[in-house]
Image (spheres, rainbow, N blue to C red):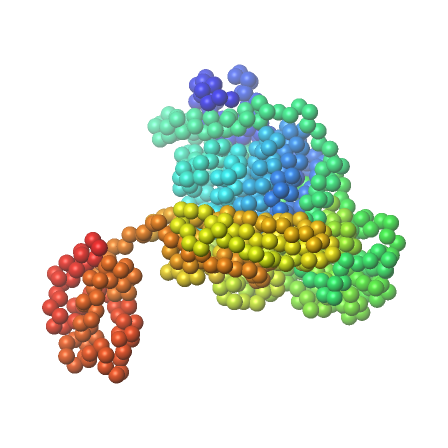
Amino acid sequence: MEAEKLKELIGKMTLEEKAAFCSGADFWHTEGLERLGIPASMVSDGPHGLRKQDEKADHLGVNESIKAVCFPAGCGTAASFNRELLVEMGRVLGKECQAEGVSVILGPAVNIKRSPLCGRNFEYYSEDPLVASEMAGALVEGIQSQNVGTSIKHFLANNQETRRMTASSQIDERTLREIYLAAFEGAVTKKKPWTVMCSYNKINGVYAAENKKYLTDVLRGEWGFDGYVMSDWGAVNDRVADLKAGLDLEMPSSMGLNDKLIVEAVKNGTLEEGVVDRAVERILNIVYRFEENRDKNAIFDRDKDHEAARRVAEESMVLLKNEDNLLPLSEERKVAFIGRFAEKPRYQGGGSSHINSHKVTSALDASAGNDNIIYAQGYGVEKDETDEALLAEAVKAAAEAEAAVIFAGLPDSFESEGFDRSHMALPACQNRLIEEVAKVQPNVVVVLHNGSPVEMPWISKVKGVLESYLGGQAVGSAQYDILFGKVNPSGKLPETFPVKLEDNPSYLNFPGEKDLVEYREGVFVGYRYYDKKKMEVLFPFGYGLSYTTFSYTNLKLDSRRIKDTEGLTVSVEVTNTGSRAGKEVVQLYVADKESTVMRPVKELRDFAKVELQPGETKTVTFTLGKRAFAYYSTQIHDWHVESGEFTVMIGKSSRNVVLQEDVYVESTVTIPVHYTTDSTFGDVMENPKAAQIVKGLMSQNMLGGSDEGGSVTSEAISGEMIEAMMRYMPLRGVLSFAGGSGVGAKELQALIDKLNEA
Ligand code: BGC
């Protein structure tokens, strides 16, 4: 609806009616108003399938929703590193929403995987903000191409489930910008989600719902967001404050309670009516965007969409180990499928994203027709303790076969929305099963079902590991086809698998003390930390194997020297050097060779997935802008590039850089320096003009006064040493040490004034 008309419509509403529009009509609908013909509009979870509830409503996945199609969860779709695939998945979800009359699907969920323990990691994409925001953006693009809205969530810094409704994420400005805001930024600025869902937690002491800085200044002011912000379910604390901060829609309905507070606040002058009008306008704008673009012919074809879910699953799995090229397996040989997840896979997580799948294909289902498969359950799913009879049966089956595939992973009770994991281990019974099977069978492959890293104490005893994440309802078909080589695996890890939990950078500060969660690792999240510390990891960020091989050649930068306002074009050739068709994820990292601020060793700045036939070569081209070289300066509150050399790296993973070239980037921005008596000589020497001014002073006998202190070229102390020592000497040091130089407080101040003018 045109803005003018919308305003006119709102003009006809009473204050009470407008206040009512600021919260839902019920659990899943926005308000409607018959008198003016305004329809109510439905929203539903999300993010990897449609959880449309009809009657009994809840936000924890307790009551049933309509039969729908469960796609792989975010943990897996991120591993595809395939934007087009997510656009396609989004299109399918968008069509389903059109068919079901859902105006906004509640996702994608982009929060950074800060700790492997976050219960909701399975819904989230990555430890890297670029991956999170690019994959989320692709899903937004696909869904919204069908004229259905998305709600990118949970804004902001909601990285754990422990005390999620009260905890405060204590994060410094630079870290927020470079990591936690960045996960949303690209998706919001480039793909324009219709809505944003604010999170439950506080950010530096202020609830997300009433955080004007992020909901308004950053989201709307800086990023140009023009949809409506809705609360997470029950995230509203102080309705009037929230409204002022930029939270338009409270969900679910406040049952009239907060409507009254809004009306009261307008009447007593503490809230401008214009703020209410603005929220209603934003909400109705989206309601009508959906209403006016309904696809009356849309149908929800569940079987067809199951096939789409299968295609996504095929790219969402990561082959982590394949010793002796044990995989792919041959259908001609006897293979033991071991583990309850082979029969009843864990393919999605618990909570608000839980889909009522219309059908599920397990690996055993997918193996129908292969008479060489034998099966043993191996373990009881929700338990840590070993069931000795199940174990014995599994070991026997494994010994009889030529290879054993163990379907392992985390049970629902270990990993879910609403609480965090307490450790990073698989159930003890599964670890023991793997060890025992490996004793009788040299050809063991472990297939994992989990939303976040697990420890693998048995890694050296098995030949193969396939990380299938939470693969959606077609999980078994994808697993089977990868195991038997009908599909060539192409996923890469969107997160680091540390050797043990204690290695994780958030370990000492997760999940915090009571309601205070200090993000003390700063920007050093995931590989940014492990690389900096040169730590051994189990599997690095960006890692994943294929049944074919790829080689990289001809890395070219279109310039060796650019200004930070110019772009840099990078191209590289990738060749499939094996004998099977396959897909490769080309990863581009940038490293600042020298910096005055603490920076990660390198950061992922772009990626592309290419499909190549055997022998085929393709050229992949990237364009890097200022942000690829920048850090966030808290001094100028903006992105800043320090002039100097940067290395552009092409990697097969974060730990396997195959080609690299340097480029000099010249900053067009000078950060103003204000010298004080505490500025050091070193600070001053960094600015050539200022350096000229103090040079004279430095050459005087600064260390120990005039005569005996020694000349700068004595045997004991060289000129270089003097300079090095002087680097940390504050300017005020002249008063104490430069006796006889004639510099007093007055002269010093005059000098500093001169420096500030230089
Ligand atoms: C979750 C959201 C979800 C909402 C509605 C909340 O508990 O945090 O992600 O969209 O419920 O079900």
The answer to whether any part of residue 644 appears in the image is yes
Q: How many marks?
A: 0
Task: Answer left or right for 755 relative to 555.
Answer: left
Task: Answer left or right for 741 relative to 362.
Answer: left
Task: Answer left or right for 91 relative to 667.
Answer: right
Residue 603: x and y in percent read 50, 56
- When the figure is inspected, residue 622 is found, relative to residue 305, above or below; the finding is below
Residue 420: x and y in percent read 58, 53
Q: Quadrant of the C terminus?
A: bottom left
Task: Answer left or right for 479 relative to 73.
Answer: right
Quarter of image, res 378: bottom right
Give the camera-side residue of 495 and 453. 495
Give the camera-side residue of 385 and 316. 316
- At a point 13% along the width and 66% down the height, the residue shown is 743
- When the figure is inspected, residue 138 is found, relative to residue 386, above or below; the finding is above
The answer to whether any part of residue 344 appears in the image is no
Residue 269: x and y in percent read 34, 28
- At a point 40% along the width and 42% down the height, the residue shown is 213
Residue 414: x and y in percent read 65, 55
Quarter of image, res 332: bottom right
Q: Residue furthest bottom?
A: 715
- At a point 50% along the width and 57% down the height, the residue shown is 648
- At a point 72% along the width and 37% down the height, the residue shown is 305
